[in-house]
Image (spheres, rainbow, N blue to C red):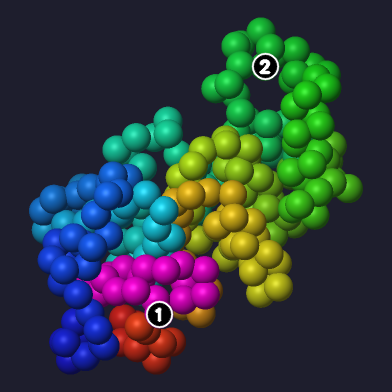
Amino acid sequence: MNLELNLPNLTPLQKERGEELAAGQPPVFLLNNAQLSYQGRAVLNNVSLKITAGERVALVGKSGVGKSTLLAALREQDPNALAWCPQQPGLVPMLSVYHNIYMGGLQRHNSFYNLLNLMKPLSQPLREVTELAALLQLDKHLFDRVEQLSGGQAQRVAIGRALYQGQGVFLGDEPVSGVDEHQAQQLLTLIVEKHASVVLALHDVEQALRFCDRIIGLKDGAIVLDAPSSTLTVNDLSELYR
């Protein structure tokens, strides 16, 4: 079955919908006929994609289809101007929740300031991180080592670190896969409220439809779907997983 022909109200890339989105809005990310590889293996071919300021975009499709590879390609365009929450968070296990979240703000200070804060939390970042930890329901664990946390708690720390970067654009690779449905909704709400532009790889299509206004579907090495979430249903997106 041709996925692109069987989903409703699809608009081809770089045509009517692309022009409508681009009108008056600068592109945040732009790919033109890109070939994307992972560990030397071609994953996505002839990728043309424009994401404009203010969009909330979900990347959906089967595991291994290239969502992480596409996110990595977007991140490479301007890694210092966006908040990044990878699937493998790379937290420092022996450091506290506080210090791992604070790492999102390392670039805002010089090395001496960061070293002082490592030895003893300074008042301003302590207040900022404490407030953020409370939103993530981590305030009671602020000075617990990350290695003492559950997987879901560690994932919330990774989200906190990304939020503390204070950027207008958020890229997340399955950022809520390790938490329950209720927590996932709270965390996604927090993410979209605090960032002007969001691109998320999500395995839960209901979350994608609820929190994002644009759905990009990947299948068989290509983008086969690019449509407003308002025109799609869960059943429509099930085509991506066949």
Q: Is residue 228 magenta?
A: yes
Give x and y (percent) for residue 124.
78, 24
User: Quick one: quadrant of the N terminus?
Assistant: bottom left
Image location of residue 185, percent across then percent down:
64, 69
* Residue positioned 59% across, 49% down in the render: 194
Left or right: where does residue 195 sit relative to residue 60?
A: right
Whether residue 75 is visible to the viewer of this picture, yes or no, is: yes
- At which x and y percent is residue 102? 68, 31
* Magenta span of residues: 208-230
- Label 2: which secondary element: helix
Q: Quadrant of residue 237?
A: bottom left
Q: Along the horizontal axis of the image, is 147 left or right of 219?
A: right
Q: Quarter of the image for the C terminus: give it.
A: bottom left
> Neighbour class for label 2 at 10 Å: few (<14), some, many (≥20)?
some
Q: How far from the left and from the top, in percent, is residue 193?
A: 59, 55
Rounded to the nearest angstrom, the CA distance separating label 2 from label 1 is 45 Å
**What label does residue 230 carry, if any?**
1
Return the residue nearer the eye: 6 or 16: 16
Image marks 2 and 1: residues in contact by CB distance under 8 Å: no
Amino acid carrying mark 1 in the image: Ser
What residue would you read off at disc 2?
114
Q: Nearer the viewer, mark 2 or mark 1?
A: 1
Please determine whether, in this image, residue 18 is positioned above or below residue 31: below
Question: Is 201 included in the stretch rendered in magenta?
Answer: no
Q: Quadrant of residue 75?
A: top left
Circle 2: residue type: Asn
SS at mark 1? helix
Mark carried by residue 166: none
Which residue is most to the top?
A: 112
